[in-house]
Image: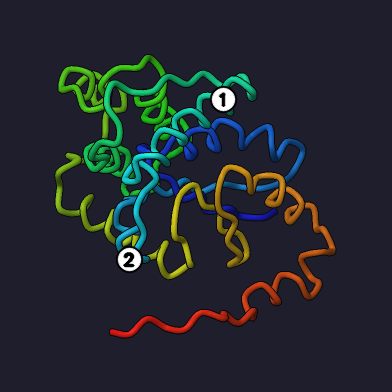
Amino acid sequence: MKHITFYLDFVSPFAYLAFEQLPQALQGLSYTVHYQPVLLGALLRHHGQLGPAEIAAKRTWTYRQVLWLAQQGATPLDLPAAHPFNPLPLLRLAMACDANGQPNRWVCESVLRHVWIGGADALDAQRLDALTRSLAPTRAPEHDSVKAQLRAAGEQAIAAGVFGVPAFVVDDQLFWGLDSLPMLRAYLLGDAWFSGPAWSQAQALPTALAARPD
């Protein structure tokens, strides 16, 4: 049985779609999933990237694309009242629901649907309070141990090569993005392509761009 670490941030619509589609994408396979919330902004800063919503034209396209993908996959999705937003309260809430900072699928589903179904404000105080009462975390989301676990999860993700979400790590191999689900399935099925030269060739390909001067 393969073990998958699924890195996600609740602010990402692609993480939401991947979460909803994962069971169907991997139907019939033997695997376990560890759902690991991480702060997407920290990953982007580490790698020197802007988020899709920080580029005006890309922001508009992203929302159009995820709405289209959702209806194509018959996945309920409503854009929240405002986006992007600071996901830290939601990340910490999910982490606080497990002593080891590893929320189960129900917790992640509850938080993701809180954001991506209904079109409401993800950080509305009354809604957050209701979500917290529903999840009944075992620790206060603002507890230092929760914050430390979230930071450690981000460091673990970076060490694993994660640069965005959704990301799936299995056997120390990284699969990124909603559109990587068919590729992930093929890997879990033992597709011979993954033991051929192409996988390693991609990493070894040299660049023809000169390094930027400091």
Mark 1 or 2, nearer chain start: 2
Q: Is residue 99 above or below residue 113?
A: below
**Residue found 51% across the figure and 52% down from its top:** 167
Q: What amino acid is found at the position of numbered circle 1 in the picture? A: Trp
Q: Residue at x 29, y 53 (%)?
A: 150
Characterize the local packing of mark 2: few (<14), some (14-19) or many (20 or more) Cα atoms within 10 angstroms.
few
* Mark 1, residue position: 68
Tally of marks: 2
Horizontal and vertical percent position of residue 23: 64, 34
Q: Which mark is residue 46?
A: 2
Q: x%, y% of residue 39? A: 32, 50
- Return the x and y of residue 171 as percentages of the image width and height: 62, 65
Residue at image point 39% right, 65% down: 156
Height in image: 185 above or below 108? Answer: below
- Please tell me whether residue 141 is drawn above or below residue 195 in the rendered image: above
Dot 1: element: helix
C-alpha gap between disc 1 and disc 2: 30 Å
